[in-house]
Amino acid sequence: MPPAISVTDLSKTYASGFQALSGVNLEVQAGEIFALLGPNGAGKTTLISVICGLVNPSSGQVLVDGHDNIRDYRAARARIGLVPQELTNEAFETVWNSVSFSRGLFGKAADPDHIERVLRSLALWEKRNNRLITLSGGMKRRVLIAKALSHEPTILFLDEPTAGVDVELRREMWEVVRGLRENGVTIILTTHYIEEAEEMADRIGVIQRGEIILVEDKRTLMQSLGRKQLTLELLDPLVALPNALADYPLTLSEDGRQLTYRYDTRQEHTGIAGMLEELRKAGIHFQDLHTEQSSLEDIFVSLVRENP
Amino acid sequence: MNLRGMMAIYRSEMARTRRTLLQSIVSPVLSTSLYFVVFGSAIGSRITEVGGISYGAFIVPGLIMLMLLTQSVSNASFGIFFPRFSGSIYELLSAPVSYMEIVMGYVGAAASKSIVLGLIILATAGLFVPLEIAHPFWMLFFLVLTAFTFSLLGFIIGIWAEGFDRLQLVPLLVITPLTFLGGTFYSIDMLPPFWQGVTLFNPVVYLVSGFRWSFYGVGDVSLEASLAMVMAFLVVSLAVVSWIFRSGYRLKP
């Protein structure tokens, strides 16, 4: 089975001379949720636009389910649903007509049952006869998703799907996206909400200045790059660290009741066992402990800093 | 061939026409009726005949052409300009439709609307003056071909225009003057010889003349010249449209 999306040596230089993509290689497997992370202007939208046929590439190749997206554009595009970043639609159309139009445009026979299912799953059914211009921003966003799903795509692109969407609706959308994945739809989303990638993605790609600087399984990424910290709640407050523990990266809180130990999960020996042994020898007892893993956001920020 | 996609575009454009029925149908019919009252009745009563045809009847083909050209251009240009303006064109460009299917959808809808409009105006004219159509087949042929060709021109303008002002510019500065100077209200042999020569460079003269010939069997230029002109215009428009899609001009960066 070919990858859902296969991008080879893709470059794009706009007429203005701005190079938005340089030599991008990327494979997205069928059935996964892939999150493309990157700061503003990194090339996320350009990459999606080239794959979906909105922007002509300067060089390179895109295969969608094994179909070249230029030579065999009908087969390639029929598989793709695109939810753009901007809230754009025909202001005076009704929700129902707009979504049905999308299905027809993609060459599918009318299927009111399918349209109804899509509208219901996005909580748009009650609004089906409303004109788009009367809808709130969140609902317009959902209409765009409904349009993209109207023709039963196997690959769904979501460009900043939850930008400007309130927290509750964001959670609802995540549910919808998870439901789609369970039905076998491949999902590629761009976001700059790290939380979103962390919550949703199976794999994460980081794009910076038109280059993919990292593609990694989310868990591996968080493990391999993740820093953890262990916090010990001490039974008795401590005035200073004993000398025997001076070599460990330990910090004592001001009230002397918390010891924090920072370590890197990439290291073979985290030193936790030795540190705890020293604590016992020094007669320091603790009543509780917990660990925290650094968030994807920390990882992302440090990655982008390392690759200026 | 994505026939469904093409029909989806066509139907959605026709639905837009129905939503804006007042300005789409009523206003052109009203303004044409006014032309009949002013030119046909008021002024026409002072002009006896042009080439053996009563003045009121003489201006009918010209008036239909005037409406056909302006409406085709403005409809088709707005039809493709609005999705560009609102950004919803992303869907068109990402759909499995060929550029020919997109053009057929938009231009077909704009031309259909103009043709219906032309026939309505023809019927309206029948209320004011006695009509005779010598060559009904040729009349329909010119009607359809002109509507289609100028809808293509409108489509090109809709892609070229970067704002609403430019959208109005070509119809206002080019189409309307060419039509008024194209023998809508007069026969060109009523002009001084110098201006007769100049008008031969006006493509609209050939359209109006051919169309008038289909009604009354007389025209300012020969039928062959009229046909050649319409065809030439069609070919040029098609060539420009195909260049637009191949180069991605104003559509795909």
Image: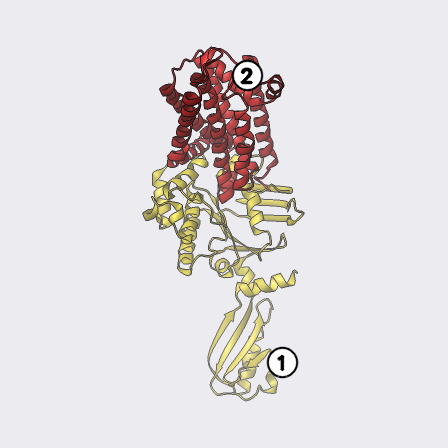
Residue B214 vs residue B13, the one in the foreground: B214
| Label 1 crowd (10 A; few <14 / some 14-19 / many >=20) | few
Q: Residues within 10 Å of mark 2 (few under 14, many from 20)?
A: few
Task: Tell me which amino acid carries mark 1.
Answer: Asp
State left or right for residue B128 relative to residue B226: left
Residue farthest toward the left in the current orientation of the protein: A126
Q: Which residue is mark 1?
A: A247
| Chain ID of residue with mark 2 | B
Q: Which residue is mark 2?
A: B190
Q: Nearer the viewer, residue B165 or B42?
A: B42
Q: Nearer the viewer, mark 1 or mark 2?
A: 2
The CA distance from mark 1 to mark 2 is: 108 Å
Q: Position of residue B5 (x, y in %)?
A: 45, 33
Chain under callout 1:
A
Quadrant of the drawing holding the C terminus of chain A: bottom right
Residue B114, how many percent across, how many down?
44, 27
Residue A55 circle label: none
**Residue type at tag 2:** Met
Q: Colour of chain A?
A: yellow
Is residue B223 shown to the viewer in this render? yes
Q: Which residue is located at x 37 percent, y 42 percent? A: A94
Horizontal and vertical percent for residue B110? 46, 30
Question: Do the numbered discs 1 and 2 sit on residues whose CB atoms are within 8 Å?
Answer: no
- Chain in red, by letter, is B
